[in-house]
Image (cartoon, coloured by chain):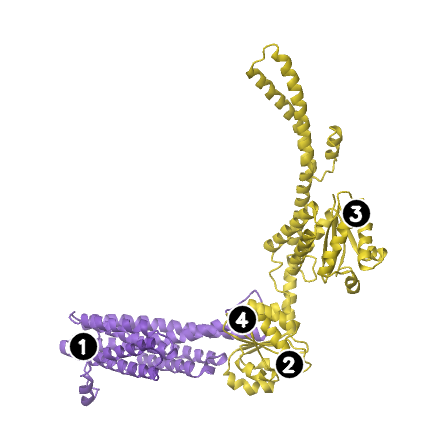
């Protein structure tokens, strides 16, 4: 039984190809069913995200399910040529495939090193395979080990602890330098698009309760506000909202500034010099840069935050060797356990066979000796002597077999014992 | 030691003030408590104003009673000024009543009166109960009030320094934020919000303790020599510091923009300046020397 992986990611394939080869959640379930029909003994987990498409397969007989057959199956699903799949997608097998999976699950192969989403995507792909019956013993073992490896990387390194997205840095690192808490602060979020949505998630996580969403389309403002249980207001209320705001965030796609210096100065006296933190996450910028020059006003633009993101990325990369070491250790541990499990049935059969021989010979000997008046004590002594003999004979080969298993069956002792003792 | 008298107060007014008894302020506080308990029955228009007015009357009569009574008592018996357990209990009640009024003015919607006023009334009751005890002598009283004076001025000075430090840290943090240094794991400072709060609290603590220190100093001097050397450098500059702190505290609470950012720093810097002056006045002269 051997794990193999065929796939592509942002590292080696263009987005155009990744788009053609990717699957949505419904398609994944269909593909798993079709795979099961085509390869009844095979196992498959299909991981399809915006940055990667990877098929992890294994079968009891490798010749049934090799690289070509998986490539052919994939090509059929997405109406691609087999050559295209083989040329564009990488192939890994055995320990390389296992190490790759562990690296992916631990988010060490992601576009943003250490991002947390991939771990849950790997888990979802595995769960889907379990639900559809395409996961078998090897897949169960390797994905559970991948989960363990990812957890070790998360807990034993700092790789996940640095924020690397602009909204997360803005809310998670800039806001705590100004305010103790967002619970009692009036937050005004301008823009209800994707960036607004992501920012809102971090605001809610940070404990913000008094948030007001403003957008030129009030419907979108209302949708976003309602989905997070906060308030919304018409765009015309912008200056009133800014007057009350402690934290003002711009995420609109407006081509012109939405708050000029003149507008801000007109409300400054009403603000009574309260501290205001402006987070301008929009490109083009939402707030006039000159506002940031005023006393008690702190303006952070996207470039200021990008610098923090880059700094955090560099900090994460410093953790890379430590994380990679964990992956190597976990891969070795996985194979050690796997090999150890593989020797179990052989050892058991060898012992059973030896005990069967012992039982037969003991019965024959006891039958002869009983005619000469063998008593119970002597009978037990003979039985113990046979047990000791078997244990002493079996100990050296079994110890060598375990050592060989720990080294990945490099000396082939498992097969040798099978043949020598005719254990099949 | 010269006996202290109440000759500075006009005789007519003194005659009126002399008629103030414990019943006057006890009743005022009791009326306040009753007014507050009426909350349980529902909304009463004008209750807050009535509470503030009655508290004002209570505090005025309480303070007048303490002053007149203490002076008369000391002049008659040559005992210490504000130097008996009874007077100290009454002073404690006065302090509690002042604290209550301050908290009440800040949040009139709360029911802190239910907790404060019974204690105020109880301490007044205690002071009445302790009337029979002999007061301490003037030298003993001067020692006690001297300790209170020194300790209070020390805490007040410490709080001024703390407020100044908070403002310096605020400026540094503000500079960091203006120069986009937020998020750096090294060289972190408390948030602007924490530093503002720290400065505000330091100001309140320093004003309260310097006020206590000044009052204790006056009582100590009256006990020790029957008068206060208002013109001596230490006293004058300590009073100047106290006056400045009161002004800054008033500005802090009644004009919010003054307490924010750079302005707060300038005020704290000035407070430090007044503190240094007061220190020079105290340490450079004969202040505190008994001989």
Q: Nearer the viewer, residue B178 or A47?
A: A47
Circle nearer the viewer, 2 or 4: 2
- Dot label at residue B1: 1
Query: Can you identify the residue that label 2 sits on?
Result: A216
Circle nearer the viewer, 3 or 4: 3
Mark 2: secondary structure? loop
Q: Earlier in the sequence, mark 2 or mark 4?
A: 4
Vertical order, A101 against A19 (above or below) = above
Instruction: Identify the subunit bearing mark 3.
Output: A
Which percent across, then down, holds residue B31? 27, 79
Q: Earlier in the sequence, mark 3 or mark 2?
A: 3
Circle nearer the viewer, 1 or 3: 3
- Local packing at callout 2 (Cα closer than 10 Å; few below 14, some 14-19, many 20+) is some
Circle nearer the viewer, 1 or 4: 4
Mark 3: secondary structure? loop
In three-dimensional space, the C-alpha distance between marks 2 and 4, rounded to whole angstroms, equals 23 Å
- Local packing at callout 4 (Cα closer than 10 Å; few below 14, some 14-19, many 20+) is some
Q: Given the current orientation, which residue lies at the most extreme top position?
A: A372
- Local packing at callout 1 (Cα closer than 10 Å; few below 14, some 14-19, many 20+) is few
Instruction: Identify the subunit bearing mark 1.
Output: B
Which image quadrant: the C terminus of chain B?
bottom left
Mark 4: secondary structure? loop
Query: Can you identify the residue that label 4 sits on?
Result: A208
* Same chain letter for marks 3 and 2: yes
- Dot label at residue A151: none
Instruction: Identify the subunit bearing mark 4.
Output: A
Give the chain ID for the purple colour: B
- Res A48 quadrant in image: bottom right
- Res A106 quadrant in image: bottom right
Mark 1: secondary structure? loop
Query: Can you identify the residue that label 3 sits on?
Result: A65
């Amino acid at each position: 039984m051997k794990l193999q992986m065929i796939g592509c990611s942002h590292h080696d394939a263009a987005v155009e190809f990744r788009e053609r080869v990717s699957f949505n959640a419904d398609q994944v379930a269909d593909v798993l069913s079709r795979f099961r029909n085509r390869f009844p003994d095979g196992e498959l987990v299909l991981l399809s995200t915006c940055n990667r498409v990877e098929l992890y397969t294994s079968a009891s007989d490798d010749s049934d399910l090799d690289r070509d057959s998986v490539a052919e199956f994939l090509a059929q699903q997405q109406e691609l040529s087999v050559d295209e799949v083989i040329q564009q997608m990488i192939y890994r097998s055995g320990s390389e495939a296992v190490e790759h999976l562990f690296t992916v699950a631990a988010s060490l192969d992601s576009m943003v090193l250490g991002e947390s989403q991939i771990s849950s995507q790997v888990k979802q792909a595995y769960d889907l395979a379990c639900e559809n019956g395409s996961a078998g013993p090897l897949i169960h073992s390797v994905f559970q080990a991948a989960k363990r490896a990812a957890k070790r990387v998360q807990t034993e390194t700092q790789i996940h602890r640095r924020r690397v997205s602009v909204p997360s840095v803005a809310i998670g690192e800039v806001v705590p330098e100004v305010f103790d808490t967002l619970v009692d602060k009036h937050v005004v979020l301008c823009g209800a698009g994707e960036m607004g949505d992501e920012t809102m998630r971090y605001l809610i996580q940070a404990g913000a309760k008094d948030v007001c969403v403003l957008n030129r389309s009030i419907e979108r403002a209302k949708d976003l506000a309602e989905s997070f249980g906060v308030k919304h207001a018409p765009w015309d209320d912008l200056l009133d909202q800014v007057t009350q705001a402690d934290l003002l965030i711009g995420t609109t796609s407006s081509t012109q500034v939405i708050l000029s210096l003149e507008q801000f100065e007109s409300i400054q006296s009403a603000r009574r010099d309260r501290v205001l933190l402006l987070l301008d996450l929009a490109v083009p910028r939402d707030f006039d840069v000159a506002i940031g020059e005023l006393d008690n006003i702190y303006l952070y633009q996207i470039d200021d935050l990008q610098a923090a993101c880059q700094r955090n990325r560099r900090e994460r990369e410093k953790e890379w060797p430590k994380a990679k070491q964990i992956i190597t250790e976990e891969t070795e541990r996985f194979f050690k356990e796997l090999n150890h499990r593989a020797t179990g049935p052989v050892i058991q059969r060898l012992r059973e066979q030896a005990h069967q021989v012992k039982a037969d010979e003991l019965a024959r000997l006891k039958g002869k000796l009983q005619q000469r008046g063998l008593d119970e004590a002597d009978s037990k002594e003979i039985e113990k002597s046979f047990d000791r003999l078997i244990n002493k004979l079996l100990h050296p080969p079994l110890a060598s077999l375990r050592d060989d298993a720990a080294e990945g069956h490099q000396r082939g002792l498992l097969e040798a014992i099978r043949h020598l003792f005719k254990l099949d | 030691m010269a006996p202290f008298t109440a000759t500075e107060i006009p005789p007519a007014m003194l005659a009126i003030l002399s008629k103030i008894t414990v019943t006057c302020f006890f009743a005022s506080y009791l009326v306040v408590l009753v007014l507050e308990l009426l909350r349980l029955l529902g909304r009463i228009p004008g209750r807050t104003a009535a509470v503030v007015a009655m508290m004002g009357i209570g505090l005025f009569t309480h303070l007048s009673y303490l002053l007149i009574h203490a002076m008369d008592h000391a002049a008659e018996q040559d005992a210490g000024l504000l130097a008996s357990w009874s007077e100290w209990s009454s002073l404690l009640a006065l302090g509690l009543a002042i604290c209550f009024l301050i908290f009440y003015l800040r949040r009139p919607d709360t029911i802190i009166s239910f907790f404060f006023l019974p204690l105020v009334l109880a301490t007044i009751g205690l002071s009445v109960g302790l009337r029979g005890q002999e007061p301490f002598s003037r030298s003993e009283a001067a020692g006690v009030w001297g300790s209170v004076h020194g300790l209070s001025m020390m805490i007040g000075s410490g709080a001024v320094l703390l407020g100044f430090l908070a403002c310096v840290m605020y400026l540094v943090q503000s500079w960091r934020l203006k120069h986009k240094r937020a998020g750096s794991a090294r060289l972190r400072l408390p948030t602007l919000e924490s530093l503002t709060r720290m400065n505000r609290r330091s100001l309140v603590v320093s004003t309260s303790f310097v006020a206590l220190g000044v009052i204790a100093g006056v009582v100590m001097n009256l006990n020790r020599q029957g008068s206060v050397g208002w013109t001596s450098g230490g006293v004058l500059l300590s009073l100047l510091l106290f006056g400045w702190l009161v002004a800054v505290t008033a500005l802090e609470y009644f004009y919010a923009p003054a307490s924010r950012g750079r302005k707060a720093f300038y005020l704290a810097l000035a407070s430090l300046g007044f503190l240094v002056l007061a220190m020079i006045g105290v340490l450079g002269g004969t202040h505190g020397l008994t001989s």
